[in-house]
Image (cartoon, rainbow, N blue to C red):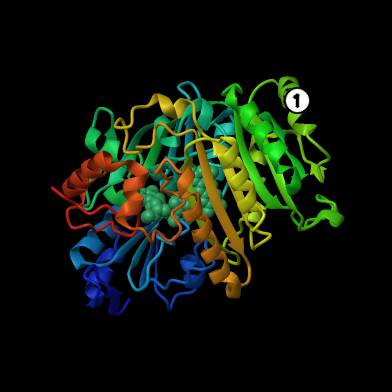
Amino acid sequence: MGDLELATLDGGMSVISADRLDALQAGFRGRLLTAHDAGYDDARAIWNGMMDRRPGLIAQCRGTADVVAAVNFARDNGVLVAVRGGGHNVAGHASCDGGLVIDLSPMHAVLVDPERQLVRAQGGAQLGDLDTETQVYGLAVPAGVVSTTGVGGLTLGGGTGWQTRKRGLSIDNLRSVEIVTADGRVRVASEDEHPDLFWAVRGGGGNFGVVTTFEFQAYEVGPIVWVCAPFYPLADSPAVLRAFRDFMADAPPEFGAALLFWSVPALSPWYPQEHHGKACVIPFLVYNGDLGEGVRLTAPLRNLGTPYVDHSRGMPWTALQTMFDPYVPAGDQQYYWKNLFLTSAGDEVLDDLADIAATIPSTYTYLVMQPIGGALNKVAADATAWGNRDVNYMFEFDSMWRDPAEADTNIEWTRRQWEALQKHSTGGLYVNFPGFGEEGESLVRRAVGDKNYEQLAAVKAVYDPTNMFRLNQNIQPRA
Ligand SMILES: Cc1cc2nc3c(=O)[nH]c(=O)nc-3n(C[C@H](O)[C@H](O)[C@H](O)COP(=O)(O)OP(=O)(O)OC[C@H]3O[C@@H](n4cnc5c(N)ncnc54)[C@H](O)[C@@H]3O)c2cc1C
């Protein structure tokens, strides 16, 4: 490798000599890619098609030793660094222009200890890796709902999904992490070792280092779960929303659920052609228990009117976990996702949500009201960095479109509706659906709470005093 110009932490550019690059290359087991290498364009692509970043160097790591080498290289040369897990962050934090990307995607192994129901996942694993390996033993880790999402970013921000009501967030089931901090040291953080660091990585995002291994508690799930999914016309919203809310108010915790506002996808024969593109509302429930019981309990929600189509059925957990994948492809679709926590699911709130749904500008977009209260409410607000422990309903704007010319319309619509909904917001939000993170520090404060924010800033000062890990929902170090 010859000399290479790389972006630096102070916003400039610096020429890194061939000697220094050769020193990094020596002993590096993964691949180092620059713009001149075959595979560079594939390696730099991230999920959100809006993001077209061109890193100066991509370090595709094969193990913890590679991560240590890459972190030391970045620190010693003052290079701007991005860390890539699954590459799903809507704001595109997995990449950068001109700097170094520490790409963990080759590190996606998952090892299961079925006796203790403990699971170790490498830092670049995706949810599909996690589900596939754990289901061999009839287990699953509480995590998200799309198989290509990275375990890394999802967990460091919290982690919600179909098991949240029963098991809490992914971080509530995290037992330890192996992490490479800015000084290049490899640390294990858990309740017993570096508890300050362990507290911070549970909700504080990628601010504290590169997590090379996550260790989780897993639980028996499936292998077949009951899924209730009738697609009703949007005009049925008043009755559907109220029935969903009333059902969830005392539904057993074995139910995971989401109320979706969507448009019937143009996918024949799965969706009847005459309904393609029609606005719809879907009470989507997942029951991890006896199949017959799931059918019986959800029957009322399937008889609220005449659905366009009813996709309710029993299905393997792994099929459920890939069910939404086709609607959120990487690369050729554009995304702007934001969220907030709702004060309640009262009638006025529900009616306002339905009114918003009637104005969605893109048939790709879905809005999601997710009941997440339950196990997560039993954890104290200061027990982990994830501060919003009193919430019950999360509301997401998952705005998506294909034509780049439609970006402004969709982003403006999302921001306007998100602002309008603030009157029904607890003031809190979930950091993993940040839009482009435009609100900066206030966004992170709303996600973790002011008290936790101060604590996070103090932990950051210990483990990353120069803010090397800054391409994230950033927390400035403050002693
Ligand atoms: C299609 C889709 C579905 C989603 N579904 C859910 C869901 O069901 N539940 C939910 O909670 N969230 C969900 N999310 C949000 C998701 O949690 C965030 O987008 C998250 O940032 C994705 O993590 P990632 O590793 O894929 O992303 P990346 O863009 O790779 O990383 C996100 C951030 O985390 C940092 N990071 C990633 N891995 C590591 C690591 N190992 N060590 C240190 N830092 C790291 C990155 O530097 C970056 O700042 C979804 C997102 C998408 C796009």
Name the residue rendered at 56%, 24% in the picture: 253
**Where residue 435 sits in the image (x, y, percent)?**
46, 58
Name the residue rendered at 61%, 35% in the picture: 257
**Where residue 294 sits in the image (x, y, percent)?**
71, 24
Q: Secondary structure at mark 1?
A: helix
Number of numbered labels in the structure image? 1
Q: Residue furthest left?
A: 479
**Where residue 77 sits in the image (x, y, percent)?**
20, 67
| Residue 104 makes an appearance in the image | no
Say whether mark 1 is within 8 Å of ligand 1: no
Asked whether 66 or 319 is in front, the reply is: 319
Q: Quadrant of the N terminus?
A: bottom left
**Where residue 76 sits in the image (x, y, percent)?**
18, 63
Q: Is residue 338 left or right of residue 33?
A: right
Say which quarter of the image contains residue 349: top right
Asked whether 200 or 223 is in front, the reply is: 200
Q: Residue furthest front?
A: 348
Q: Amino acid at mark 1?
A: Val
| Mark 1, other Cα within 10 Å: few <14 / some 14–19 / many ≥20 | some
Asked whether 369 or 82 is in front, the reply is: 369
Q: Is residue 153 left or right of residue 180?
A: right
Name the residue rendered at 33%, 55% in the picture: 66
| Residue 395 makes an appearance in the image | yes
* Residue at the disc numbered 1: 295
Question: Is the residue 339 above or below the residue 30 in the image?
Answer: above
Name the residue rendered at 60%, 47% in the picture: 353
Question: Is the residue 452 above or below the residue 399 in the image?
Answer: above
